[in-house]
Amino acid sequence: MNMKELNYTELKNTCDPYKLGFKTTKELECYNGIIGQERAVKAFEFGLNVKMKGYNIYVAGPSGSGKTTYAKQSTEKKAKNEKVPYDWCYVYNFDDPRCPLSLRFEPGIGKQFRDDMNELVSFFKTELSKAFSSEDYDRQKIDLSRVYDEKRDVMIKRLDSVAADKGFSLKTSNSGIIFQPIIDGEPIDEENYDNLPENVKEGINERLELIQDDVNSIMRDIKAVDKEYKQKMDDLDYKVGMFAIGHYVSSLQEKYQNSERVIKYLEAVQEDVLENIDQFTENEPDEDDPIAALIPKLSGTKTEDVTLKYRVNLIVDNSKTEGAPVIVDYNPTYYNLVGEVEYDNEYGNLTTDFMKIKAGSMHKANGGYIIIQVQDLLSNVQAWEALRRIIKTREIAIENLRDTVGAIAVTTLKPEPIPADVKVILIGGSYYYELLRGYDEDFSKLFKIRADFDYEMEMSDENISKIAGFISKFCKNENVPAFDCTAVAAVVEYASRIVESQKKLSTRFNLILEILAEAATWAQMENAEFVTAEHVKKADEEREYRLAMYQEKMNELLDDGTVMIATDGFCVGKINGLAVLDMGDYMFGSPTRITATTYKGKSGIVNIEKEAEMSGPTHNKGVQIITGYLGSMYAQNMPLSLSCRIAFEQNYNGIDGDSASSTELYCILSSLSEIPVNQSLAVTGSVNQCGEIQAIGGVTYKIEGYFDLCKRRGLTGRQGVVIPVSNVKDLVLKEEVIEAVKEGLFHIYPVSTIDEGIEILLGTEAGVKDENGEYPSESVHGKVMAKLKLFNENNDD
């Protein structure tokens, strides 16, 4: 038997500090770029340059890979050279007050327009008050009143004459003109009229009917005169008002002559002011009068500012903006995105107006870019729907959320939508990308650019050099001691360990920043001039210690025998498997005992975990693959008559994954062949139906977990692990494990097939078929075949 064992030099790809070309990071230029993300950078920059519809960007990648920082910095760099977008205002809509109008201005002009309108309203107040309190206006009004009073007097005299001819006199009251009958030379009132004889009343009524047509005709003439008088007074007020304010409005229209909407709005303002001049000329209520002040409160009404509708609500002010805006929305709720209409609660009455319209982040980003974390977006009700609607319709409509979900809503405003020109950059994991793509059929049309940030990069001289520059930048920014070359090499090896690869480095720079900060802190606590490899190692060890409480509890159970694991001797149907426990921010390996029992029967392989509903789908698949392997190897000429029970002993939390499938198969073969398994060894690896060993995850942590147990019990020189040969490149083991392998106290055996593992674990040749298709009787396969034939014969009986 030829058992290949890994040399200690194969257990880690070391970074030689003395080949880095510097002594400390003080000598290096700071590196400010993104490291190891060429594909993502190319996709992102292309996405920024495409201005057509639908080319929004989804930045995908693992947490801590620097994607948010890069997206913000790269976008800001491009945006600063782009055009500053428009200002946006909302103003009163005189045709439909519930639908405020939007006005667009060049950057900085919106603020001017708001101030100009405030000044204009001040002119309205002063000039109109002055005009309508002038002697000239009073004289014209008196003259006009005199003319129409004379006309009215002539008509009243005619009416009086007609009435007198038929025995009536005229009396004016609040309800109009009253005809009183004259009896014995005196007009009688209603009470005396009722006491008159019926024949007298009939005579009076007959006389009244005779003059009715003349009376109606004269009354129509009086009303026409009154109407004409009112129209003349309105014309006078309009003329005086126009003379007072017209030139101010015209001046403003000339200033904003390039905007047809502004000109029309100013015309509407002028017409409304002239139609409601009383608002500016009536005396204001006495604020010192407590009764007058109490009336609005008692009635539940709010004292209205008559000039409110002439004000300007500047919701987007780009007067101080340089380039296109880049907005990062850290709380993308529905209202934070699209804006909202706020309300005042006045004694139980909810009131609002166009001045209470508030801009959302999409308004502020209009003409530029907005960056949103997709997890934050999806955690807010209706936020995704609001965003997709803006992207699809290319306009920002402020709507009450209660309306969108069908709830009872108070009367609100419906501001005119604003055209949207925003490039949306979503940042999140690949999971959310696939979730949105499956949930929303329009997602791929709305986000046509995907920039994938990788979790790893090549361990190249270029990337190592960039990491050194990154560390230099960190030291200068944080004002901490520089890292010497040994510390930089240790950080590189740490980045290799994070990603579990001898050929790759991690791009999760948040984790690298943590080790940098902690190593620098340990150096400062020792008053060291530079951060060294020892400080990096110290930071790593201390971090492990802080997070390893659960691991220590597990170790205690192993050490006191509560969890039964043998690390020496030989046993049939028992084997040491290897598992990884992921605590979120900390992973560690732990051995687990797997047992198999075999006996005659036809139930096949029974996965006890599955029967107990503690097995995941991938583990169930692995058990089915084992059945396929056994059938292929031993049941070509006879049925596979076998009953087998396989279990992960003392497992109470469930199990999934197929990384123990080869381990389970070795255990089954040991039970069938009755050849004991070497308990000094632990095994990991997936197997396919052809008996080939496949790579698994977490191999470094699995080896270290078993090594720690063996070290606590005492290294014998016989202990070790069996791993897939395809995982050798993933080994980034701790120095103590490498040292033990170097001294022959611990062994790591890479295998590519089940047969190679059999010979290591069972200490017996696996066996190869001869020309007759038979395995050697003393080989493992020969013994397994003999047992299965026996089971088959017994079953036939």
Image (cartoon, rainbow, N blue to C red):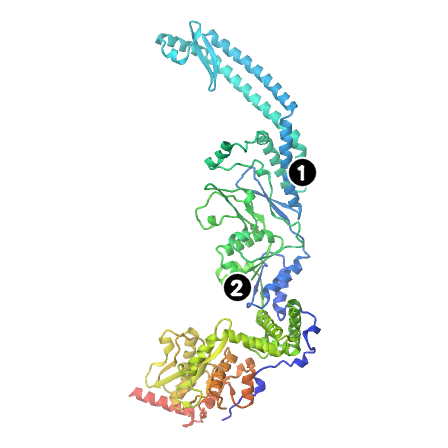
- Residue 576 pos. (x, y %): 44, 84
Which residue sits at x=63%, y=80%?
15
- Residue 559 % position (x, y): 43, 83
Q: Amino acid at mark 1?
A: Leu
Q: Amino acid at mark 2?
A: Tyr
Viewer-closest of 178 and 386: 178
Disc 2 and disc 1: Cα gap in Å?
A: 51 Å
Residue 252 - label: 1
Q: Nearer the viewer, residue 738 or 34?
A: 738
For marks 2 and 1 on the same chain, the one whose residue lies earlier in the sequence: 1
Q: Is residue 753 visible?
A: no
Front disc: 2 or 1: 1
Which type of secondary structure does the marked residue at label 1 adopt?
helix
The x, y position of residue 23, in whole percent, is 69, 78
Q: Is residue 410 above or below residue 586?
A: above
Q: Which residue is mark 2?
A: 433
Asked if marks 2 and 1 touch (Cβ < 8 Å), the reply is no
User: Local crowd at mark 1 within 10 Å, few (<14), some, or many (≥20)?
Assistant: some
Identify which residue, 371 or 515, lies in the foreground: 515
Q: Give me the disc on residue 637.
A: none
Q: Secondary structure beneath disc 2?
A: helix
Q: Name the residue: 61% across, 28% down.
A: 238
The vertical placement of 712 against 312, above or below, is: below
- Residue 517 occupies which quadrant of the picture? bottom right
Quadrant of the rendered image containing residue 265: top right
